[in-house]
Image (cartoon, rainbow, N blue to C red):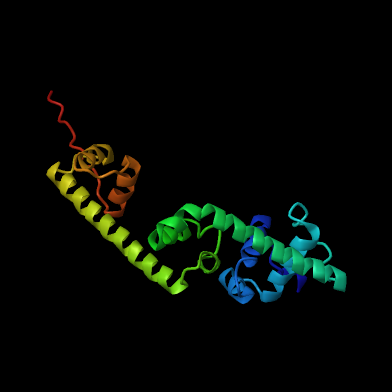
Amino acid sequence: MKGNKKDYPRDFKLKVVKLSFEKAKLQDIARKFNITYETLLHWRKNYIINGEENFSVVGKTKLTVREKKIYDLEIKIKKLDTEFKILKEAADYLQKGYPYIFQYIAKNEQNHSSYMMCKILGVNLGSYNKWKNEYVSERQKWKMMVKQEIVSIFIASQKRYGSKRITAELQRSGYQLSSSTVLIYMRELNLRVSVKKCKIIT
């Protein structure tokens, strides 16, 4: 029924369509964003025929033979443009070797699929995923160590130090953290400053 048809935001559609030009399997994209394969094809055709400015307008999506050739050519051009952009941005990383290439891919996963970046930059997707898992676990270990330091400082201060004073203590020990980050960690640890009330003598 038409009344049950879901209305997706324009920005969401654009994000999904642009990502679809990078991925090998459109089914994966459709599944990831919980839309049908047919819906994704419809959005892609709309984007190619009507352009980005008129993308939100429901327009013609049934293609003639000539329009189909133009559509396929447009997709190839968009893929080539994206590949050129990635190669240009990753040029310095490519000269430094795999760990740096992996860092570039991790930083840009919000803009491009890791599958496509690995393919363009000539690295193995499995190797990247293995590096990423190890990289994340190292960050988690570091975060745990920082939290232990925060707890130690907090207890030593008899629960009187807030995020700013704890940040200052951490920075003296060589940790580069902002007070806002320390505050987030304190909330995750459920640490609350104990304020003693002064007795008024009458």
Q: Residue furthest front?
A: 95
Quarter-wise, where is residue 31 in the image?
Answer: bottom right
For the N terminus, the quadrant is bottom right
**Relative to residue 180, is residue 16 drawn left or right?**
right
Residue 196 x %, y %? 18, 37
**Relative to residue 151, is residue 71 drawn left or right?**
right
Residue 152 visible in the snapshot: yes
Marker count (numbered): 0
Quarter-wise, where is residue 82 in the image?
Answer: bottom right
**Relative to residue 149, is residue 125 drawn left or right?**
right
- Which sits in the foreground, 96 or 109? 96
What residue sits 81% from the left and 66% below the top? 70
What residue sits 35% from the left and 42% below the top? 180
**Relative to residue 64, is residue 117 drawn left or right?**
left
Residue 87 x %, y %? 55, 57
What residue sits 65% from the left and 62% below the top? 80
What residue sits 58% from the left and 74% below the top? 28
Residue 8 visible in the snapshot: no
Quarter-wise, where is residue 46 in the image?
Answer: bottom right
- Which sits in the foreground, 70 or 143? 70
Residue 103 x %, y %? 42, 58
For the C terminus, the quadrant is top left
